[in-house]
Image: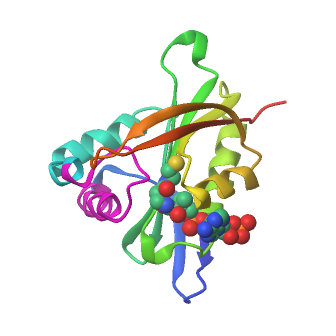
């Protein structure tokens, strides 16, 4: 699916394939170095290898139940959205969502476009009924994005996140039904 960005670049959304591993690894390293809102640290991301990245992509692409969506500007990945189905059968109707966009591409509607595509994917998924996520309480942009898509807060773990500098942030838990 193709869209135009405000800067004139073409934005393409598609699912990841194994050959994306090298560019996706560079993307993740940059992403983790730009934000503290994600669960991985920049040091952890710096230690990943291309082979591990291929295995990561394979873990999504080996069956149709999980989604690893990439947003490209040209040949460069600039955004990712993942949904993983829970592995316990009693929770197999729940998927866990994660999203990231490179800093220089924030506020161009890329998050919104990926969320729209992922919502359509989840609505057509044979088992998923609920999508859930955790978001740092100080991540106002992400919380706004999720609210725009009908996600509601269902819990808040106080001090649920401990940053590398030792500071704590509450973790807000949000969910949305994708089936009636
Ligand atoms: C959260 C993130 C994915 C959003 O991506 P994006 O492409 O910038 O999102 P969009 O441009 O589609 O939408 C952002 C929304 O936040 C709003 N927004 C921007 N700055 C904001 C702020 N300071 N406070 C509240 N809302 C804000 C925008 O107005 C927009 O909402 P609107 O469509 O109603 O106007 C991106 O900022 C990111 O990758 N952040 C770092 C990683 C991260 O936090 N991931 C989520 C972890 S839970």
Residue 170 image offset from top left, x and y in percent: 52, 39
Instruction: Look at the picture and state if 144 lies above or below 172.
Output: below
- Residue 123 seen in this snapshot: yes
Residue 2 image offset from top left, x and y in percent: 59, 72
- Ligand 1 found in image quarter: bottom right
Residue 168 image offset from top left, x and y in percent: 41, 42
Instruction: Look at the picture and state if 104 lies above or below 53.
Output: below
Residue placed furthest toward the front: 167
Count of all numbered marks drawn on residues in the image: 0
Residue at the spot x=26%, y=57% of the render?
25
Residue at the spot x=17%, y=45% of the render?
51
Q: Nearer the viewer, residue 153 or 121?
A: 153
Instruction: Look at the picture and state if 72 lies above or below 167.
Output: below
Task: Specify start and end residues of the magenta stretch as a single range.
Answer: 20-43
Residue placed furthest toward the bottom: 8
Instruction: Look at the picture and state if 78 lies above or below 157.
Output: below
Residue placed furthest toward the right: 180
Residue at the spot x=25%, y=55% of the render?
42
> Image quadrant of residue 161?
top left
Q: Nearer the viewer, residue 30 or 14?
A: 30
């Amino acid at each position: 699916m193709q869209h135009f960005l405000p800067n004139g670049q073409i934005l393409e959304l598609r699912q990841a394939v194994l050959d994306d591993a090298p560019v996706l690894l560079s993307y993740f390293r940059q992403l983790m170095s730009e934000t503290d809102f994600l669960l991985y640290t920049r040091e952890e991301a710096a230690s990943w290898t291309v082979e591990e990245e291929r295995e990561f992509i394979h873990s999504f692409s080996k069956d149709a139940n999980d989604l690893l969506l990439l947003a490209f500007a040209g040949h460069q990945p600039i955004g990712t959205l993942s949904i993983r189905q829970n592995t316990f059968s009693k929770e197999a109707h729940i998927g866990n969502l994660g999203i990231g966009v490179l800093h220089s591409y924030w506020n161009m509607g890329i998050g919104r476009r990926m969320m729209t595509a992922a919502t359509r994917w989840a609505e057509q998924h044979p088992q998923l009924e609920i999508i859930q996520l955790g978001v740092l309480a100080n991540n106002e942009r992400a919380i706004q994005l999720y609210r725009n898509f009908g996600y509601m807060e269902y819990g808040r773990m106080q001090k649920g996140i401990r940053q590398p500098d030792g500071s704590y942030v509450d973790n807000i838990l949000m969910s949305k039904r994708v089936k009636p």
